[in-house]
Amino acid sequence: ESYLYVFNKNQIHQITPIVSSGTLDHTQTIISSTLGCRSSRSIENVENDVYFVDSTIYSLGEVANYSVLRTTNVSAKISKLFANMNQSAITDVAVIYYDKEETLLVAIQVGNVTNDHIVAYQLGYKAWTYWDSIKANCFLDYVDSNNEKHLYFASDEKSLIYELYQGLNDDGAAINRKYKTKQFDLDKFNIEKIWQNWNVQLGGVYGVLTVNFYVDGSLVDTTVFSSGTGAITSDGWGTEPLGTFPLGLEGDYAEASSSEANASNDWRWHTLA
């Protein structure tokens, strides 16, 4: 069944078409009488749902499956990211759902001039990504002659159009990323412990990884190793069927090559100690 959703500043309405004796009519249902949408550009179909932005990101629920809906704050877990959002520029928010990556991208304005941050929600992982270096004022997805989908955005900063989700660099510059683990104290911080044979399992990424070890907040050791190259490589756990090699492949195989290497190699195993 088809519905029309009407958003105003403080309300959301659902319009249901009715055909009676050859005459087209409709009924109106108020979904919300206190919450609306101040940014028409932010209303986006996401699978069977409708997402929109007001003070933060909301959804209507499974609009394709349920006739009775209620608004849900989708971004409650990252509410702090919206604390510095420029509310006066809410009408400039740009949104797109890129179904190839199952990701909703929301460009918001934290500064005083343009959209300068992107909040991305990955539906498959129910995970959030926060980019503070992309100034996007609009998005466009495009299917080329090979039936490949691409995602572009227009930048207010340089008056250029960029493509997302392609290549291994950021407009020619290396992509740097930091990840901090939790503190490993086994819930007994007052007892000294010795950790041996540290290992890390990485996704299928390329580049140089620097691992810093901290004890009681102080840097005590640093290990640097490479995780593949720009070419397709094969190494570590998961690159061969179980039984072909010992489980885990003892030792460090950062650059081990294989004649059977292919793009399905999604994991690499490294011994850090």
Image (cartoon, rainbow, N blue to C red):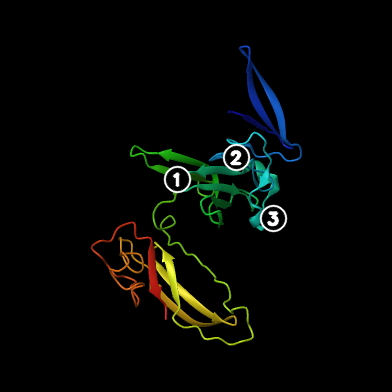
Residue under the point 33% across and 73% down: 249
Q: Position of residue 119 (x, y in %)?
A: 58, 52
Among the 4 quarters of the image, the one containing residue 225: bottom left
Label 2 SS: loop
Question: Which residue was labeled with disc 2?
Answer: 62
Mark 3: which secondary structure? loop
Q: Amino acid at mark 2?
A: Glu
| Res 231 quadrant in image | bottom left
Instruction: Judge depth for marks 2 and 1 and give the one in front.
Output: 2
Q: Earlier in the sequence, mark 2 or mark 1?
A: 2
Answer yes or no: is residue 206 visible: no
Foreground mark, 1 or 3?
Answer: 1
- Label 2 packing within 10 angstroms: few (<14), some (14-19), many (20+): some
Q: Nearer the viewer's eye, disc 2 or disc 3?
A: 2
Q: Reply above or below: 92 against 240.
A: above
* Mark number, residue 83: 3
| Residue 189 image position (x, y, % from top left) | 63, 82
Give me the disc on residue 100: 1
Quadrant of the drawing holding the N terminus: top right
Residue at 71% from the left image edge and 30% from the top image edge: 29
Q: Position of residue 233 (x, y in %)?
A: 30, 63
Amino acid identity at mark 1:
Lys
Question: Furthest residue to the top?
Answer: 21
Check disc 1 and report its element: helix, strand or loop: loop
Q: Earlier in the sequence, mark 1 or mark 3?
A: 3
